[in-house]
Amino acid sequence: MIKIAIVGVGTVGESVANILEKNADLISARAGKELKVIKGAVKDLSKKRNVSIPLTDDIDEVLNDKDIDIVVELMGGVDEPYKVVKKALENGKAVVTANKALLAYHRYDLQKIAGDLPIGYEASVAGGIPIINALKVGLSANKILAIKGIINGTCNYMLTKMINEGIEFDEILKESQELGYAEADPTFDIGGFDAAHKLLILASIAYGIDSKPEDILIEGIEDINSYDIEFAKEFGYSIKLLAIAKKIDENIELRVHPVLIKNNQMISKIDGVMNGISVIGDFVGETLYYGAGAGGDATASAVVSDIVEIVRAGKSSPMLGFKKPFKSENLKLLPTDYIQTKYYLRVTVKDEKGVLAKISKTLGDSNISIDTFLQKQVGDDKAILLFSTHVCYEKEIKKAIKEIEGYDFINQKVSMIRIED
Ligand code: NAP
Ligand code: HSE
């Protein structure tokens, strides 16, 4: 019998315990052995929970228990789970985790510590979608040319409700928390950091690139308002928080930010808490993955799949998918300034003569050509100017925005959304 301990019996941990109990016969047939959760570790033993496993509030009791074969880390955070996972591995236990924040910072050192011990992390990206296995195994023949993903369920749920039902930001955020989609600190979701953590994990498997969240462009959905939504609707766009990895020659572009994306693109149709990821390989072409990206049961489904695989296979393949460094290509992270895309700008101005001409000239002087323009009147003396541009460099748009924000007719900070065609 394989003995399992769950460290963190919250939204996901409870579901893991329940799946292992409810589908015990099927799972043991698939794994070839009986599996049993013999302990769960939590912070507060007095909390009511829907599980029937013995609980402790002493993690060391789990980590030092010689009987335990697999430790499932579902506590969240970075520093504390790092210590837990490290000690579990040092004590010879296999580990399964759903913790993308932990992996965004420590995936390479944990891979080293693990050696031949397996670490499963399928649940860390896109909840129930088996994207880690797809990249690590299914697409291993290919050079990965691009990954574009909606990989934060909370943001997708919120944007869908804001666009389709006109519900206010704060109200939907509260709902996402109640539904168990949001992180303990929801600024990780709405600020784009959670999606960035997941993108970095995918980028390691796809490109062998060891970047940290601080190295890449990350923007959240906090500034999106009803004018942006109106503009999107008028010009046939949806608004999504997209995580993008692109191979451009020997450079890798990694970025997370809201995008305006044309309604005829498959990924624009992924709504609610669903996640969707498009991966383009040089031989396979485009492949698409779709499913629930957050929530206890969907995430626990991926956690249990790792447990089954560990029991079936014993030793693991290299955690991040490379057995030795890939030296033929010297892939480097593309500096943010050199990102090239189209942009949408929302500029709130005093409604007076010469304003539009001045902004157009500033954009033109920065090599930026305007594609579409819309003006919304707000009262008698204020106007909101909405522009979209042709492709330009990130450094050019940033320079132009800085200049525009310096004019005395500007009422508030210029808002910018990148356009992904
Ligand atoms: P959660 O509901 O907040 O549960 C966290 C659990 O960890 C709780 O049971 C908590 O104990 C326990 N815990 C925290 N610190 C502890 C400590 N020092 N000692 C012992 N127990 C401790 O979180 P969750 O939503 O299940 O998420 C768990 C992990 O899965 C996170 O890394 C998250 O990013 C990841 N994840 C979540 C989802 C999702 O949809 N929720 C999806 C994918 C990945 P108490 O219950 O006593 O407070
Ligand atoms: N908070 C995350 C999300 C959970 O909303 O996608 C799944 O990783």
Image (cartoon, helix red, strand yellow):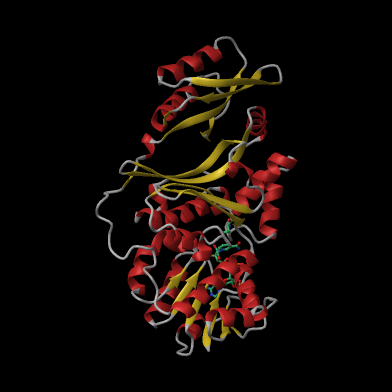
* Residue 238 on image: x %, y %: 62, 37
Q: Count all numbered tags in the image, as a single digit.
A: 0
* Residue 277 on image: x %, y %: 53, 51
* Residue 59 on image: x %, y %: 50, 80
- Which of the two residues, 262 or 192, is positioned nearer the viewer here? 262
- Which of the two residues, 248 or 181, is positioned nearer the viewer here? 248
- Residue visible at 48% across and 25% down in the picture: 390
Q: Is residue 382 left or right of residue 306?
A: right
Q: Is residue 58 above or below residue 151?
A: below
Q: Residue furthest front?
A: 283
- Which of the two residues, 298 or 81, is positioned nearer the viewer here? 298
Q: Is residue 216 above or below residue 124?
A: above
Q: Is residue 393 above or below residue 312?
A: above
Quarter of the image for residue 326 reads bottom left
Q: Residue furthest top?
A: 353
Q: Quadrant of ligand 2?
A: bottom right
- Residue visible at 56% across and 60% down in the picture: 129
Q: Is residue 388 above or below residue 281?
A: above
* Residue 50 on image: x %, y %: 70, 76
Q: Is residue 108 visible?
A: yes
Q: Residue furthest left?
A: 327
Q: Is residue 221 visible?
A: no
- Residue visible at 60% across and 42% down in the picture: 268
Q: Is residue 248 left or right of residue 286?
A: left
